[in-house]
Image (cartoon, rainbow, N blue to C red):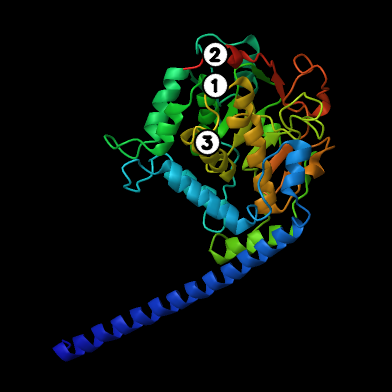
Amino acid sequence: MPTTRARCHRFSAIIIIFLLLWSQSFVRRAYYEQQYQKVFQEAESHIAYLNVDYNASQILEEYNLNIGSKESIRLPNYLTGLKQGSEKIFTQSDDSGALPRGVRRALEIAIDSALLHGNIQLSPHQLAHQIFTTTRDVTTLPTQYKSWTELNPGWNVNLFDDEQIELWMAHHLTSSQGSPPSLALKAFHDLPRPVLKTDVFRYLVVFIEGGLYTDSDTGAILPVDQWDNGTTQDWTNSHLIQLTSNARRLWGQCICCTSITSSPPALIVAIESGPDGSRDGSHTTSFQVVQWTFAAKPGHPVFLDVVHRILDNSLSNKYGRGTDADVFLWTGPAIWADAVWRYLLARWGFDFRRLASITHPVRIGDVLVLPLASFEAEYSERWVKQGDEARVWHGALGRWRDQPLD
């Protein structure tokens, strides 16, 4: 049998080998982190180069879009804005720093998207097969709504009235049972009109759970899984595709990383108005983005961006009681368009004005943008012709306008 001294030597050798392996792993990780920072800085510089002609004042004047300054859409500043916005809005009101249980994972994914998708494994799967809809009466829906289940068999349909929205928000915006509400929940309760609350809900439910949101006055024309079809064109900057793959490889997400555009889109939106939308008076903004229907995987940063800005405005009482015109700016398609285009500029260096005349779906990074009229209808928006790219019928009933103030 080995002597006590021999056993001690053997134990010491094991400890030394363990420390050597640990130190090598530490050095390797430090090296990868250093290389990742180089990739991130290169991406930041390249995006800034792509956005060199961006002029916030011109965008605001010509299109009534409040995207922000050139400095604010630099990738590190965009990332900082997401972090600070989430910390301000989603932490508990008792200053404990705890995050609401439903928000934690979605926040991780959102921040990761701005970090070149390095830390979170990109999902190879399609959207979660679930549909969310808000309505005054869950037992009575317009006839055309049944087309969502007819064309999307196997998808779960989740209907929410005002009371169910309140319950969902309380459940997901509280860190644990008995804990004080988050500032987000307080800001939500302070919203003076039901339409403002349903707008916030639609963003948050897709941010946290993923899937598709659509208004009750819509109908499906094409199955959701066929929205990204053979006519889609990839307009993503090739260098940013490569840098994203490099970032993922350095963080061990893959060995031979494929293009991010080979994975299903993480966000699907459609254009509602063209370059003249705000000038001809037909829309609040030009390049407006459809807000009655959109789809996403959980945790997309666009939703974090739009929600923290909305609720921050609520806490500061920026819009008072919220007129019909204020709704579009406060929670509706105007602030939604700002968030979508801000993300494309900050993360992908893509100028949304290039989308002015598209007649086919366009892929930019993890985002699929559908052309004007894809989500509209000749019946309700009489000036549009949906054509071959029709995916959603919209009744444009506008029932929110006759909802009273709280």
Residue 325 x %, y %: 64, 23
| Disc 1: which residue | 195
Give the alpha-carbon distance from disc 3 to disc 1, as whole Å. Answer: 16 Å
Q: Is residue 120 above or below residue 100?
A: below
Label disc, if present, on residue 110 of the rendered structure? none
Crowding near pointer 2: few (<14 within 10 Å), some, many (20+)?
few
Q: Nearer the viewer, residue 159 or 274?
A: 274
- Please state which amino acid type lies under the numbered disc 3: Asn
**Pointers 3 and 1 in contact (C-beta within 8 Å):** no
Secondary structure beneath dot 3 equals helix
Q: Nearer the viewer, residue 230 or 349?
A: 349
- Please state which amino acid type lies under the numbered disc 2: Gln
Give the alpha-carbon distance from disc 3 to disc 2, as whole Å. Answer: 21 Å
Query: Which quadrant would residue 143 be assigned to in this image?
Result: top right
Crowding near pointer 3: few (<14 within 10 Å), some, many (20+)?
some
**Pointers 3 and 2 in contact (C-beta within 8 Å):** no
In the figure, is residue 20 to the left or right of 233?
Answer: left
The N terminus, quarter of image: bottom left
Residue 145 x %, y %: 62, 15
Query: Which quadrant would residue 77 be assigned to in this image?
Result: bottom right
**Pointers 2 and 1 in contact (C-beta within 8 Å):** yes
Label disc, if present, on residue 313 of the rendered structure? 3
Q: Nearer the viewer, residue 69 or 138?
A: 69
- Please state which amino acid type lies under the numbered disc 1: Val
Secondary structure beneath dot 2 equals loop
| Disc 2: which residue | 403
